Image (spheres, rainbow, N blue to C red):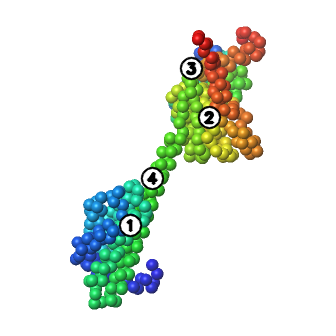
Amino acid sequence: MERIPILKMGDYLLVTIQVDMHDRLALTLQDDLTEGIARTRARGVLIDISSLEIVDSFIGRMLGNIAAMSRVLDAETVVVGMRPAVAITLVELGLSLPGVRTALNVEQGMSLLQGARAEQENANGRAER
Amino acid sequence: MNQKAQSLIPDRSRIPEMIAKRESDLLTDWMREQLAATTLRSDLMRESELREQSRQFLNLVIRAASQQPGLNDINAPAWEEAREFLSGVSRSRAHQGFSPSETATFIFSLKQPLFSLMRQELEGDPRKLADEMWVATALLDKLGLYTTEAYQKAREEVIRRQQQELLELSTPVVVLWEGILALPLIGTLDSARTQVVMESLLEKIVETGASIAIIDITGVPTVDTLVAQHLLKTVSAARLMGADCIISGIRPQIAQTIVHLGVNLTDVITKSSLADAFAVALRRARMVITRAENHG
């Protein structure tokens, strides 16, 4: 079955979506990712959608769901590389993904995750996990 | 055309044949009329050019009129060439800066020469002359109206094109600093313009990798719920791309309107001036501006 690979990079999981998303694939990704976070005890998830040309309301909602689920599992989610056309479409659809962090590219997304983690650790008053 | 007018039209008009017979006389008279008219624009058009246009048009009219259904219906296929030529003339005059009446004079100045020609040709038959006069008047009026319409269309085209150009010119996205964009909006925001603004902002974000964009609305005269909604859409779209937006240039009057309308801008950073917004943006980008030490 077709699957989207989930790569582990230190404390973070990296998902690069490079094929057209259809609904079943999105649901599989959701399953794999939540399982992956639990198994690897990842602290952050970075989803790169820079090659995604079409995002419909289902995929948009799924991104929001993944972010919410990861937060429950104590991992931050950053969606990076959204194309201008996709951003406009999502806004027109009324989906502004309120709970999702976004960044322009993988690099900025990664530093955002690291920043968020440092902030959280400071707030919790502990140096290591 | 009503029933009564219809009945005035003779079975077969002799006008095409008369024009063809005395084409050069008619052309000379017509040219004289056009040159004598107060609406002549010798500053915009040379006489030779005008003569050539008149000659060609007269030719096309003769050709069209000699075919079915004759002079009564200028929308018929037989008149196609003449119509096209006429709209070409109107269009070029519209672009050259002729007024509508100066353009329509091209047709209406043909009236007098044509009528005098008909009077000479049909001297012994007043009844026929009256009938033919009616046909000629109706024809020239139709052609005149057609000219004006074509003129109007050409002008509307110009207006539409300028609107488009204005739209593109009025939405510059400027790079204020590394990673900081500014979008000074001037004029009313409608949905078409929001689309352009949004697109150019997002493109620029991708191009420059900026993480902060300042939308300055100093030049937006009024902010109603619709404009506010458009602004928020732009902000959301930029956020989806990973860039934060600051809205600046909110005048006191507009702040009052926004609150009275119940528009929710709490999710967006707002500043009263572009300078304040820029300071926030610099702080976000972890940069400071310091005064240079005076070594004097």
Upstream in sequence: badge 2 or badge 4: 4
- Measured as percent of width and height from the top left, residue A21 is found at 55, 33
Q: Is residue B220 visible?
A: yes
* Amino acid on which the number 1 mark rests in the picture: Thr
Q: Tell me the CA gap for discs 1 and 3.
A: 72 Å
Query: Of discs 2 and 1, which sits in the foreground?
Result: 1
Residue at 65% across, 38% down: B232
Residue identified by numbered label 4: B158
Q: Of circles 4 and 3, which is in front?
A: 4
Residue A95 visible somewhere in the drawing: no
Question: Dot 3 surroundings within 10 Å: few (below 14), some, or many (20 or more)?
Answer: few
Mark 4: give few (<14), some (14-19) or many (20+) Cα within 10 Å.
some
On what subunit does the disc labeled 4 rest?
B
- Local SS, label 2: strand
Q: Quadrant of residue B219?
A: top right
Q: Secondary structure at mark 1?
A: loop
The verdict on a common chain for dots 4 and 3 is no
Q: From what the image shows, is residue B215 above or below residue B63?
A: above
Count neighbours of disc 2 (C-alpha within 10 A) and say few if under 14, some if 14 to 19, many if 20 or more.
many
Q: Label 1: chain?
A: B
